[in-house]
Amino acid sequence: MQKIILITSLFLITVITKAQPGKVQAAWRNLSDYESSFDTSSLSKANEAIQLALVNEKTKDDAKTWLYKSKIEMYLYKEDYKKNELKNKGNSDVKELSYQLSNAKFIDDATKSIQKTKELDKDKSYENDIKIFHSQLVQELNNVAYSKYKARKFEDAALLFSDQYIITKQLGIVDTNVLYNAVLCATKTGKHLLTKQYAEMMINEKIANSFAYTSLFDAKLALNDSTGALEAIKSGRVAFPNDTYLMNKETEFFIQQGDATKAMENLNKAIVATPNNATLYLVRGNIYDNMANPLKGEKPINFEELILKAEQDYKKATELDPKNFDAWYNCGAVYNNLGSFYQYKADAIPKVNAEQKALAEKAQSLFKNAVANLEKAISINPEDVPSLTALRKLYLIIGEKAKSEQISEKLKK
């Protein structure tokens, strides 16, 4: 009995295998029925038939098979849209809401299937069908992608925008904005591999803007690929040599890597390009400040030179942006550090003399400047604890005990 069952099973497999090529015809027949009647059971039958055709050696690489598959998937998407439309009937924004809730996979699958059709259609038998379907698909992709974006479904939106770019390109249109939208949506997902994928796609397509390079830089940095991040930003700087934002990103990278020299080179170029940008002076001042006050080791021999350069940049930042808290605070900190430097020198002289007095007076003058700048800082941010703490100490140094006590009371609260 076992042998009979085995032979019967083999016979059945042979029959099914031979029957597979007819499944393409069955898919077409049911697809036609659906197009004339919108009977969803016909669509289901068409889908079942095409799935079987896709696993058959004779039909799986046929352009016709994939053309029918793409149409079926488009209709499956539209049926899903209709269901959502029915659920939200009465809503004033029913169309937008239905697009937002629709299953993005159906339309993405339709995109991939029509691409496969074009690839397999060597003799261009279905060229006209493909063009018609492309046009229909672009409109649907556009509607759904923007709706997903508005609904903050950024991963779906990124996928659909990239699909739209591919299809419009096959129609002979290179839509840079669509692929930019894909990169933008990818960055909003917080998924760094996704951002990397779409940013690299835009760069490889040779239509990248500076945003694509900065997005790739940020993604690679987040993925702990500092070498790749530097390569991305360098490529961006070659493509857009005058782009300040790219230059700032590269500068930021050099600062993080502790390469003050390269960071300074970039900042100097950026300041020449945009001399009224307060942030650039603030960042450059901060580099001078860090060079003058290293976290480890003694102060450098040219401490005064560096700290005075920092002071000049911070002052410039306050002039260009009077409401910039960081600029006022850093300026106050510079005067405090410089005052401490001269006070230390004065204290090192064992006897009171003209030099010692001059140094002490210079220190007091700098401490008063520090107070004035920190007072400006807390006028912008009255609750900043580091500013208040520094002011409390400085008031005591310059003999303003009452003001120091007032701050002490404020800090207690």
Image (cartoon, rainbow, N blue to C red):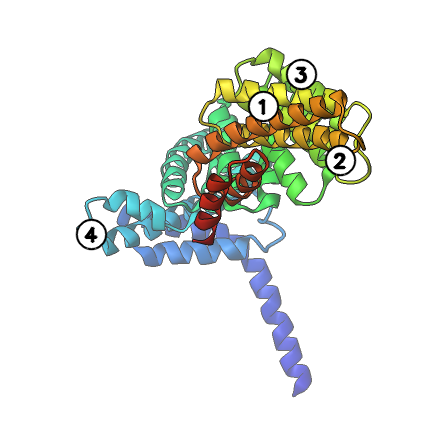
Question: Is residue 216 in sight in this rendering?
Answer: yes
Marks counted in the figure total: 4
Q: Which mark is residue 294?
A: 2
Q: Of marks 2 and 4, which one's residue comes earlier in the chain? A: 4
In three-dimensional space, the C-alpha distance between marks 2 and 3, rounded to whole angstroms, equals 21 Å
Would you name the residue on which mark 3 appears? 268
Earlier sequence position, callout 2 versus callout 3? 3
Determine crowd level at label 2: few under 14, some 14-19, many 20+ residues with C-alpha closer than 10 A: few
User: Which badge, 3 or 4, is on the more N-terminal residue?
Assistant: 4
Front residue of 72 and 379:
379
Tell me the element at label 1: helix
Residue 269, x across and y down, in percent: 66, 15
Q: Residue furthest toward the front?
A: 352
Mark 1 surroundings: few (<14), some (14-19) or many (≥20) residues within 10 A: many
Q: Position of residue 172 (x, y in %)?
A: 50, 22
Task: Tell me the distance, in whole angstroms, between the alpha carbons under discs 2 and 4.
Answer: 66 Å
In the image, residue 250 sits, relative to residue 4, either above or below, namely above
